[in-house]
Amino acid sequence: MLIKLKGSSLKQKLITIVVMSAVGRVIVFFALPSIPSPLGPDEGTYAAVVQWTAESIPVEKFPDYGAGLYLSGRSFFLPANALYRIGFAPLDAVRLTASLYGLLSLILATVLTLTVLRINFGGKLSSKYNENLIALLFMVFAFLPSHFVWSNLGLREAPNEFWIQSGVMSLFIIHYLGGKYLVISAFTLFISIIFTFSARPQTGWLIGLTALIYLSTKFRRVETPFLIAIVLLGVILGTAGTAGTAGTAGTAGTEKVDGDISIVKLIDRVPIKHKENQDQAASAIETLDCPLEQTSVINRPPDRVSTYLCILWRAPYMSSTFLLRPFIATEVTSTASLIAALENIIWSIALFLIVYMIVKRRGIPHFDKL
């Protein structure tokens, strides 16, 4: 395909790749079975949430998860809910929503790439070799399993990716263009933070903290206090919008369901669910034990301080896990973890090159270009 596009401009090549992705998504949508895929078994749970809420059943009574799952994924569930109401099956609704988010992420990446080239190179690179290299890298990104495969399944990864990209692009435009684009970019950043919290609360914190760290290096700019206030407000509203979510289970508070306290039921099932995850779609990676972990919700109820301290305790281990694992061969237990391990080789090389360029250039002014 790239050979056929050699006579085209870089913009035409990128647009062609977006069209190829769109066509591929339509084919995959109709080719997928009408049951949850083994690569993303959570599809079934998310489809059930969509049907549950569309039929106006109180979300607090959703089995096992309560309101927490819905609150922590509204930027995904609300569009899927709208598709369900106009006639799509619940599973088709979540798959189509994820696929549209995935396509929007690719479109956003196209706009960002062309904007970077216009700002730094006047819109045209010095050689066809460089254009073809960018087109090739763009093709790799467009069809990476983590972007293409999982965004065709009814999972929250696609909206999570889109809103993070939207937030990062807003910071880029604020930095390089500012001026007349400042207000709309600040508003986009604000919305992106809130919606990221409503896709994956953990990454909502990540994008908020990243924006604050970046802005803290730009205090000499007049607009910085305004932007910091915008980011903090986005984090506060994003957190408030997902209040009631507890850990990865997403259960809400201690409301009673069918006479039982749902949080107690859920904690009793944690060891069993962990074993099930390792036997099915997960890898051999285990959760790091925390010295302050609450072992019994009845005899010693969990407190907020211990929960946050455990998050800090696990942060270095979980960050390295997020960036580098699963390792191929040693931590592969399923098709899903094999795909992830193979793709991790690409991301590990990219991470090494970023660190190498930072060390090579050293000077802080060069970070803007990096």
Image: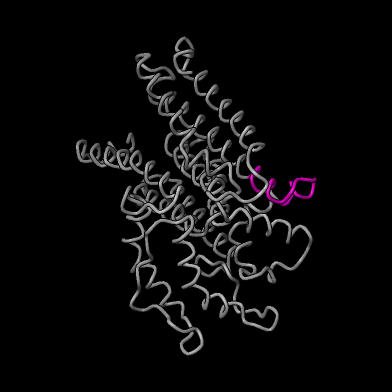
Instruction: Decide if residue 245 is on the left or right side of residue 275.
Output: right
Query: Compared with residue 354, is residue 50 higher up or lower down, i.e. above or below?
Result: below
Residue at 60 percent of width and 30 percent of height: 22
Colour convention of the picture: one colour
- Rendering quarter of residue 151: top right
Front-most of 366 and 54?
54
Front-most of 119 and 219?
119
Instruction: Decide if residue 36 is on the left or right side of residue 50.
Output: left
Q: Which x, y percent locates residue 194?
A: 56, 54
Residue at 42 percent of width and 34 percent of height: 176
| Start-end of magenta stretch | 81-97
Query: Compared with residue 245, is residue 351 higher up or lower down, i.e. above or below?
Result: above
Q: Which x, y percent locates residue 272?
A: 49, 71
Instruction: Decide if residue 309 is on the left or right side of residue 150.
Output: left
Predominant SS along the magenta part: helix
Q: Which x, y percent locates residue 45?
A: 63, 59
Q: Quadrant of the C terminus?
A: top left
Query: Compared with residue 84, is residue 148 higher up or lower down, i.e. above or below?
Result: above
Residue at 40 percent of width and 46 percent of height: 338
Query: Compared with residue 282, is residue 162 higher up or lower down, i.e. above or below?
Result: above
**Does the magenta segment cover residue 88?**
yes
Q: Which x, y percent locates residue 301?
A: 49, 85
Count of numbered circles in the view: 0
Instruction: Decide if residue 257 is on the left or right side of residue 246.
Output: right
**Does the magenta segment cover residue 137?**
no
Front-most of 52 and 213?
52
Task: Work out which residue is located at the far bottom of the displayed protein and give it.
Answer: 299
